[in-house]
Amino acid sequence: MRLRTTFRMSLSSLGTHPFRATLAGLGVVFGVGAVIAMLAIGEGARREALRQIDALGIDKIILRSVPASGKGAQDTSFYGLTWTDRDHLKHQFENITDAIPVRKMNQYLFANSRRTDINVLGVTPEFFPVTRSRLLDGRGRGFTWIDIRDRTPVCLVGKAAARTLFGFEDPLGRSLQIRHQQFAIIGVIDNPIDYSVTSGCAVNNSVYLPIETANDIFGYMTPRAPGNASQDTRVEIDLLIAVVTDVGQIENTAARLRSYLDAAHPNADYAVEIPLMLLRQKERTQRIFSIVMGSIAGISLLVGGIGIMNIMLANIYERMREIGTRRALGAKRRDILLQFLLESVLLTAFGGMAGVAGGVGLARIVERYAGMPVGITLEAIVVSMVVSVGTGVVFGTFPAWKAAQLNPIDALRSE
């Protein structure tokens, strides 16, 4: 009963000066709000990065063709990974079970006599299970060895590309024109995590041809863009996805790969990416980000705590007659201490709740208008509330102790 009475008295005291109490809690509001918002943005960025990395799994090594930058880099007519590289990886690296090639065809695609900017990729059938892609609703079919053997002019369309090309019409059985060749659509591809093969080439927003068919029809030369005076370029493979057997040896395998590619490509026309290493790097970056945000929050809460201590000390001198009266009526020192400590904790608790609401709102605004993913976690909210209440305890203890130590006679004599 005594605790309940003290709680009601603390609320009543704060309600007597609501504007002062609001100003005292603003530091906590801003500190908690900033922490919630920044952690939500950081968590969203982390989840997005992990989603992209998880699309291929940590048992992959990604090799990309890039314009030459080493010796002889002035000759850019032919650069990048080759089929020889792919065969070498498959047969000479015991820790690599497969090397899946991808080629960006750089061909104009026509649908309903209308040219589109949708990317056309040449792939093998293994590309789809490796990128965790599947046929939409289980309809249609994928590429078969007969399609590859007979160079059948068939294609698969990502679900976003299908929507762009045909609206709400069923694309199965329709055809697309790539350069002067018609390709029959045999299936629609759905990638649940919307993985991007390369920059601007999302799995769901691309059209796929069997890579052997594409090479036979279009060759390896990449036409120069209109108005570009430079010569045409030749790239055999834009991307190689190497599947590793033993993840524990992935770094050693990557080191061997780099040694081989350094010797085979003195122009340094390749890049190596290891999703596992990217994952570890993202985790390190996230830890640093959390430390920085925690430091900023700590400073904000420190300023807010000092403000609360200042307000509570001022309250003591304003309410000395109240304290003296309570002591004269039988209140003990611990009752006075508990009342002032509760007032401080209530201030920071209310400030923490307001800060959580403001931080969540700010995160949603950023998500909606800036297009950045956010991730609001229960752990962040709980920790923020615990820290805000802890701030009230830490910075309210001294004023509460000082109030409890007042001599009731001196307190009653004060004006």
Image (cartoon, rainbow, N blue to C red):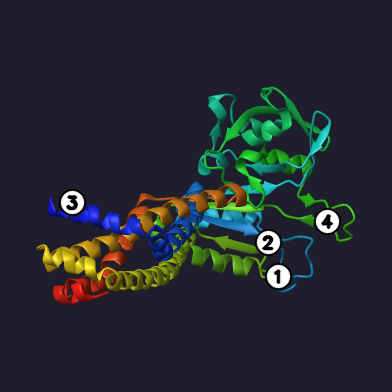
**Residue at label 1?**
69
State left or right for residue 335 relative to residue 233.
left
- The reply to whether residue 73 is in sight is yes
State the CA–CA distance, disc 4 to disc 1: 18 Å
Q: Looking at the rendered structure, which numbered label has been put on residue 4?
A: 3
Give percent across and percent down for residue 80: 68, 59
**Residue at label 2?**
66
Closer to the chain start, of discs 4 and 3, is: 3
- The reply to whether residue 401 is in sight is no
Give percent across and percent down for residue 249: 41, 61
- Which residue is located at x 67 percent, y 52 percent? 237
Query: What amino acid is at disc 4?
Result: Asp
Q: Between tags 4 and 3, which lies in front?
A: 3
Q: Secondary structure at mark 4?
A: loop
The quadrant holding residue 203 is top right
State the CA–CA distance, disc 3 to disc 1: 75 Å
Q: Residues within 10 Å of mark 2 (few under 14, many from 20)?
A: some
Q: Looking at the rendered structure, which numbered label has been put on residue 232?
A: 4
State left or right for residue 133 relative to residue 121.
left
